[in-house]
């Protein structure tokens, strides 16, 4: 069914309202440690070509961009938060203000998509994953990391978390979007609120 123009206009206005829910992603020790740990593991198991093009979706203030640049890759970041975009650009990174569900890049642009704690901010994650697949090269790798629902931290109640899904749903959506699941990673730790958990999914774009 074709969406009428008025429907697109309402969707656009709704997405603009949601943009106000964003907040700066200041670096934290926990997220910096997980980023470094997972990057080391990922790049050791799935080596990238020299100068590989990498998209850091929801790049925050650039902890992963820093590492990618240090290793000689060509990283690009996107974020909807003005403070984060400015912080990354001040460090010399190539970063655009862009919605993860509407990527302004040609098909098969990137060798790797790095997406830590971003897709739960999408109102339609299946569509968002389809966009990831569109701009990823065939055989390219995507790393998706999400918070588990209904932990002591109750990520489903966060201000701009709209899709805090269970593990099976993420696996299903990745498969439907053209990704082969290579491995899953669990992160279990304790916060001031109690036990918490993140899930990581390493996938390859397949035919």
Image (cartoon, rainbow, N blue to C red):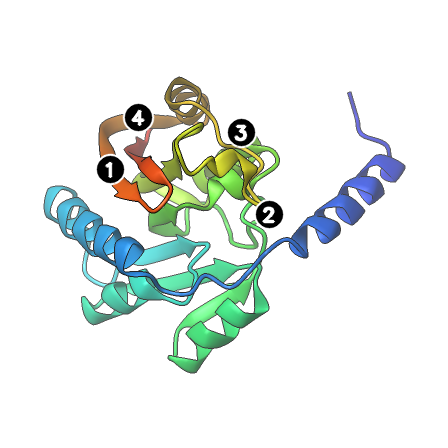
Circles 1 and 2 in contact, beta carbons < 8 Å: no
Q: Are marks 4 and 1 in contact (CB under 8 Å)?
A: no
Location of the C terminus by quadrant is top left
What crowding class fits label 3: few (fewer than 14 Cα within 10 Å), some (14-19), or many (20 or more)? some
Which residue ends up furthest to the left in the rendered image? 44
Q: Position of residue 121 (x, y in %)?
A: 54, 43
The image quarter in which residue 67 lies: bottom left
Residue of label 4: 180
Q: Decide which of 206, 196 is in the foreground and name it.
A: 196
Looking at marks 1 and 3 on the same chain, the residue that comes earlier in the sequence is marked by: 3
* Viewer-closest of 191 and 68: 191
Label 1 CA crowd tier, 10 Å (few <14, some 14–19, many 20+):
few
Asked if the residue under mark 2 is in contact with the one under mark 4, i.e. CB atoms within 8 Å, the reply is: no
| Percent of width and height locating residue 96 | 53, 65
Mark 4 or 3: the one toward you? 3
Tell me the distance, in whole angstroms, between the alpha carbons under discs 4 and 2.
22 Å
The spot of residue 16 in percent (x, y) is 73, 53
Q: Which residue is mark 3?
A: 126
Can you identify the residue that label 2 sits on? 102
Marks 4/3: CA distance?
15 Å
Q: At 23% across and 28% down in the image, what residue appears?
A: 182
Q: Secondary structure at mark 2?
A: loop
In this rendering, the count of numbered labels is 4
- Establish if 186 lies above or below 62: above
Give the spatial CA distance, label 4 vs label 1: 21 Å
Label 1 sits on residue:
187
Comes first in the chain, label 1 or label 2: 2
Answer with left or right where residue 114 lies relative to residue 9. Answer: left
68 lies left or right of 58:
left
Q: Which of the two labelled residues, at mark 4 and mark 3, occupies the earlier sequence position?
A: 3
Residue contact at pointers 4 and 3, CB within 8 angstroms: no
């Amino acid at each position: 069914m074709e969406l009428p123009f008025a429907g697109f206009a309402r969707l656009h206005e709704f997405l603009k309202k949601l943009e106000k829910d964003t907040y700066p992603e200041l670096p934290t020790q926990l997220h910096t440690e997980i980023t470094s740990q997972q990057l080391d593991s990922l790049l050791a198991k799935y080596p990238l070509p020299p100068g590989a093009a990498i998209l850091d979706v929801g790049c925050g203030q650039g902890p992963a961009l820093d590492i990618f640049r240090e290793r000689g890759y060509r990283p690009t970041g996107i974020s909807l938060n003005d403070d984060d975009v400015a912080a990354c650009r001040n460090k010399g990174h190539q970063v655009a203000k862009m919605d993860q569900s509407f990527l302004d890049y040609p098909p098969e642009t990137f060798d790797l998509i790095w997406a830590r704690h971003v897709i739960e901010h999408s109102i339609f994650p299946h569509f968002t994953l389809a966009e990831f697949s569109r701009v990823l090269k065939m055989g390219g790798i995507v790393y998706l990391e999400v918070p588990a629902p209904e932990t002591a931290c109750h990520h489903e109640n966060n201000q701009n978390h709209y899709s805090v899904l269970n593990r099976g749903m993420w696996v299903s959506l990745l498969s439907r979007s053209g990704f082969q699941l290579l491995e899953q990673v669990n992160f279990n730790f304790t916060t001031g609120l109690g036990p918490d958990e993140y899930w990581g999914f390493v996938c390859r774009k397949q035919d």
